[in-house]
Image (spheres, helix red, strand yellow):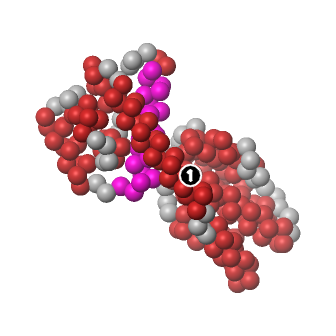
Amino acid sequence: MNRKQFVQAYSGFIKSFIKLNRIAVRHGFSAMEIEVEDVDFEDFRMGLRLLIDKVDPGIIDEKFTNLIQFTKDKLERQFRVIVKRAIQGMQKKERASIIIVALNSYANLSKEEENQIDNLLVHENEPDTEKEFNEDMDEKNLDVLFSKVILNIDQKKIKTLLKEIDSKDLAKSLKNQDNAVKEKIFCSLSKRAAFTLEEDIDYMNPETNEIAEAQGKIVDIVSEKLKTGEIE
């Protein structure tokens, strides 16, 4: 790999990273499943699959460290270090802007190369009205789906479900829900737990994508419980 090939590959990688990271932030790692096979970079595909499979950070670090260690070409090794940093940043849920600053540093870009990347980022961040509309609709549809899922669960089985749900995700998911959905949950909690949850809902100010992500996690848990027959 020569320098020109490296910069070209790096530009394409950044574009791919921005797209996949945006999906992960909005809808969780599992939502990347459909897109993974279209990723051009083999190491990045591997890393994304590890994120989707919820593999331990230590194992991810070890896999990439071994790859890097046995890569002879200097620029290929540098590129693999960059991919590793991107995957680790995604796993830690760092802001995309912070990750990209780190990646540019690892890439050791010249001023001209940095300007090329900056132009790419400006283009990638241009508003896409139709895309944003579709994503907003996805979030609204998920909100409706979440409501229906909760209301259709047998009240006696709600306690079983709540044992599997993170309290912060529960509070986020209920932020904009109507009273019927909230009451279904509150009725299965102790007075103290219900009071704490209500306080969390009132004081939390999650972004729309955070609410959607939390609701998506809970819908996934319900789906698994339905398959095993633990809830009806």
Query: Residue 177: x percent and y percent?
Result: 31, 43
Q: Is residue 56 magenta?
A: no
- Can residue 92 be seen at all in this image of the molecule? no
Quarter of the image with the N terminus in it:
bottom right
Residue lying at the far right in this picture: please name it.
2
Q: Quadrant of residue 15?
A: bottom right
Could you tell me what secondary structure mostly forms the magenta stretch? helix
Q: Is residue 79 left or right of residue 217?
A: right
Q: Which residue is mark 1?
A: 134
Q: Residue at x 82, y 61 (%)?
A: 73
Picture layout, residue 121 above or below residue 208: below
Looking at this view, is 18 or 113 the one in front?
A: 18
Looking at this view, is 167 or 123 the one in front?
A: 123
Residue lying at the far left in this picture: please name it.
191
Looking at this view, is 168 or 65 the one in front?
A: 168
Q: Amino acid at mark 1?
A: Asn
Q: Residue at x 75, y 53 (%)?
A: 41
Range shown magenta: 206-226
Residue lying at the far top in this picture: please name it.
229
Picture layout, residue 53 above or below residue 176: above
Looking at this view, is 11 or 92 the one in front?
A: 11
